[in-house]
Each structure stands twice: as structure tokens, then as C-alpha cells.
Image (cartoon, helix red, strand yellow):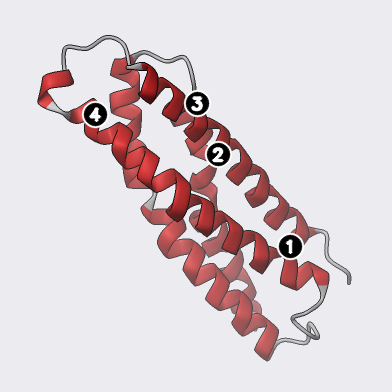
Amino acid sequence: MKWLVWFHVLVAIVGIGPTFFGNILLRKHQTITDLRHNILLQHKLDYFPKIGGTIAVITGILLVIFGEYGSILQFWLFAPLLLYLAIQVLVIGFISPRLYELQQWLLHPDNRASTQLPLKHVLGLNALSNLYMFVSFLGFLIFLLMVVKPT
């Protein structure tokens, strides 16, 4: 059982951890060249939460089923599941479409010489940055609930 706990912690860090880089990579007020580079990095990092986060949820459920943690309806067990679900809804429903739209514009051959984003995409980048800040906060709450649990 101890190996499952270690595996769960490792997968949670690897899975949810890269989400925190969205704040840095998609920050407001950066050059368009940096943004082009960073949006490609963010696209690659998006695989970690999708795969690692899902494995973390599965191993967490296995820990509850096979461990002696009690009911899954306890706040410190149920709240992280809800927070993870909220993160997935935000990433899949709100962040990914905006990120894709921004990426399409940035990487389009006609826009390679551009030095400024159009207002539409500046507003989209600001929204993305704010959403990533909120997602990072929710991820922090998940880790906090997993560390500060009743003994």
C-alpha cells in the first residue's frame, strides 16, 4: 500500500505540477516572439495534466478503496476530486479553445512578421493568464488538502 501512496504523490506532482507553468508561459505583457515560443512549450506541457492528473485520480480512488481512510465523502478526500473536476472543466472548456485560437493566429505564416497582437488576442491572452492563475490556485488547494489531512 505504501508504494501506491508514493506513486500517487509522484503522479500528482508530475501531472498537476506543469499546470503552474501556464502562469509564466502565458503571462501578459511579453513580446510576440516570446509568446510564440511559450505557446508551443505550453502545448507540450498540456499532456502532463491530462495523463498524469487522470492517473492521480485513479490511484487516489484506489487508495480510498484499499486503504483505511474511511468514506470518500470526507471533505479532505471529496474536495480534491471536485477541485480536479473544476480544473478539467476550466482547461478543456475555456483554456484549450482560447489557447488553440491564439496559437493558430501566432503560428499562421501571414502573421510571422507581426510585432503586436490584435486587440482580440490581447484580451484572449489576458483571459488565459487569469484562468491559469485561477487553475493554479485550485491546484494549490488540492495539494494543500492532501498534505493537511486528519491523521
Q: Residue at x 63, y 51 (%)?
A: 139
Q: Which mark is residue 126?
A: 3
Residue lying farthest to the top in this orientation: 115
* Spot occupied by residue 48 in the image (x, y as percentages of width and height): 42, 55
- Give neighbour class at mark 3: few <14, some 14-19, many 20+ (Cα, 10 Å): some
Of the numbered discs 2 and 1, the one sitting upstream in the chain is 2
Q: Which mark is residue 146?
A: 1
- Give neighbour class at mark 2: few <14, some 14-19, many 20+ (Cα, 10 Å): some
User: In the image shown, does 36 or 4 lie closer to the viewer?
Assistant: 36
Check disc 1 and give the amino acid type: Met
Question: Mark 1 and mark 4: span between their CA atoms?
Answer: 39 Å
Q: Residue at x 78, y 79 (%)?
A: 73
Determine whether, in the image, residue 33 is placed left or right of residue 4: left
* Spot occupied by residue 116 in the image (x, y as percentages of width and height): 31, 11
- Give neighbour class at mark 4: few <14, some 14-19, many 20+ (Cα, 10 Å): some
Quick one: quadrant of the N terminus?
bottom right
Check disc 2 and give the amino acid type: Leu
Question: Mark 1 and mark 3: span between their CA atoms?
Answer: 31 Å
Question: Mark 2 and mark 3: span between their CA atoms?
Answer: 9 Å
- Is there a contact, CB below 8 Å, between mark 2 and mark 1? no
Of the numbered discs 1 and 3, the one sitting upstream in the chain is 3
